[in-house]
Image (cartoon, rainbow, N blue to C red):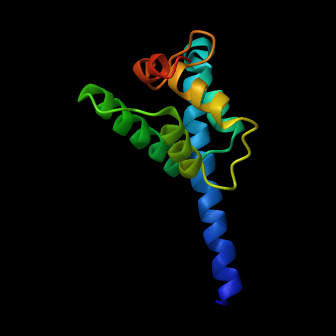
Amino acid sequence: MTIELLEKLQLLEQRIEKLEFHKSLLQQLTRSYEENSLFDEIISHDLSRNQFQNLLDITKKYVHQLEIGQPVLHHEFLEEFKEALGHEVRVFSYDQFAKAWLKGIDGSFGMSKRLADHFNY
């Protein structure tokens, strides 16, 4: 196999993994859109499972900082949030996506009400 063909196969594998991840989110959405509307945002921004996990890890890190009384600054969180998404993600507003991520959308669940409240979302 040529290097070019191997690269194409790797890209195809990555795309299949992302589609499988999106499929699992769609299954959650179909059960209850109102509760899981955040997943629609994740799919529309074409996030991979790895990006999703990175955002979860960042969220947990900052929640832990709040719990132990360390200062938690919005701009630092947002910078790590942007970095975790990477350059290929098309987000019109990182702050709005971070708000949806933490708080949820129209009453749906979010990843951290505590952080959302801390950042006055």
Does 105 sit above or below residue 82?
Answer: above
Judge by depth and name the residue closer to the eye, 27 or 73: 73
Where the C terminus falls, by quadrant?
A: top right
Residue drawn where x is 65% and y is 77% of the image = 7
Taking the image as shown, residue 19 lies to the left or right of residue 70, namely right
Q: Name the residue furthest bottom.
A: 2
Judge by depth and name the residue closer to the eye, 121 or 43: 121
Question: Horizontal and vertical percent for residue 57?
Answer: 39, 42
Does 18 sit above or below residue 95?
Answer: below
Q: Quadrant of residue 94?
A: top right
Does 36 sit above or below residue 5?
Answer: above
Q: Quadrant of residue 33?
A: top right
Where the N terminus falls, by quadrant?
A: bottom right
Question: Horizontal and vertical percent for residue 31?
Answer: 56, 18
Taking the image as shown, residue 17 lies to the left or right of residue 59, namely right
Question: Horizontal and vertical percent for residue 29?
Answer: 60, 23
Residue drawn where x is 62% and y is 55% of the image = 16
Count of numbered circles in the view: 0
Residue drawn where x is 62% and y is 35% of the image = 42
Residue drawn where x is 69% and y is 74% of the image = 8
Q: Name the residue furthest top.
A: 107
Judge by depth and name the residue closer to the eye, 52 or 4: 52
